[in-house]
Amino acid sequence: MNTAATTSQAPQLIDILRRSTAFLARNGVESARLDAEVLLADVLEMERIQLYVQHDRPLIHDELERYRDALKRRARRMPVAYVTGRKEFMSLDFAVDSRVLIPRPDTEVLVEAVCSRLAALGIDDPIVVDIGTGSGAIACAIARGVPGARVLATDISGGALEVAASNVAGLGLTGRVLFAQGDLFEPTSGTEFEHMDVLVSNPPYVPSSDIPSLAPEISRYEPRLALDGGPDGLDFYRRIADGAPSRLTGRGFVALEVGEGQAASVSDILEQAGLADLEAICDYSGAIRVVVGSAPGVRGDTDVL
């Protein structure tokens, strides 16, 4: 058998990329070229730039089969992060699957707001509770950003907490980020986290009736439990606001991610609950993404932008 001749006949990387991009585009994937590159780089365990450095590299049968499988799943509109099982957030690598919401770049603004406000208040040893932690991205990023923080990550989903626990272990944060299963504040009762300096959450905020009209990547694959915010999308903000004032320390604050157009309503909900110094923080596109409210009596220069 002529091995050299067989290898030369194998499809080259650049041709595979061209054909896979066209395949994804035909199946309605808007970011077809990028996704084709990301998936191939993942299969070949290399950086995307190497796809072009090694553009004439042939793919062996096993690599082609694994890449075809990844392309088929993406063509069914499975998110790239679920296909690869990984997602970067705040320069940290997180395992993700369909049990958890995929971390978004916009949520980095929430983490930055928490870390900046803690620094402005001079709090370097905060007790932090992350409600609805999902993959654990927010909890882990805060723990990394504030080395003295002690963080409790809660979720009603046991499956989500399994994913979060694997991420905590993988990032070397065992012992600093703890877990508890339950609904909202329930897991904090009777623990050292019953009164907290920071209550942070990216709660479900999509109105129930809007979920079917979301992109297929979201409506078909991401957990509805992490999306559905009730009839007007504000159910969880009301429940968080009801419980927060009695659980925040005197120096504490609430930081919540909000959906498009929800900032004013969420601010009103927090204000009516007695929270003070309300602040709205924009994401990188200029849309309001985070609302922060302090425990009554907390004052000072806490601007984070």
Image (cartoon, helix red, strand yellow):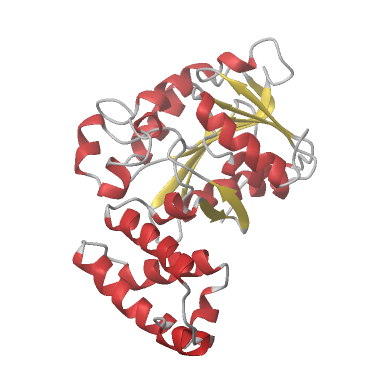
- 304 displayed left or right of 30: right
For the residue pair 146 and 24, the one nearer the viewer reads as 24
Looking at the image, residue 137 lies above or below residue 253: below
Quarter of the image with the C terminus in it: bottom right
Q: Residue at x 52, y 54 (%)?
A: 87
189 lies above or below 103: above
Q: Is residue 301 visible?
A: no
Q: Is residue 5 left or right of residue 215?
A: right
Q: Which of the two residues, 257 or 75, is positioned nearer the viewer here?
A: 75
Q: Does any portion of residue 121 appear in the rendered image?
A: yes
Compared with residue 103, is residue 185 higher up or lower down, i.e. above or below? above
- The residue located at (64%, 34%) in the rendering is 165
Q: Quadrant of residue 234?
A: top left
Q: Residue furthest top?
A: 190
Q: Tag count in the figure?
A: 0
How far from the left and from the top, in percent, is residue 114? 61, 43
Which sits in the foreground, 241 or 294? 241
**Which x, y percent locates residue 44?**
53, 69
Instruction: Residue 211: give x, y in percent of width and height.
Output: 25, 37
Which residue: 42% across, 81% down?
Answer: 10
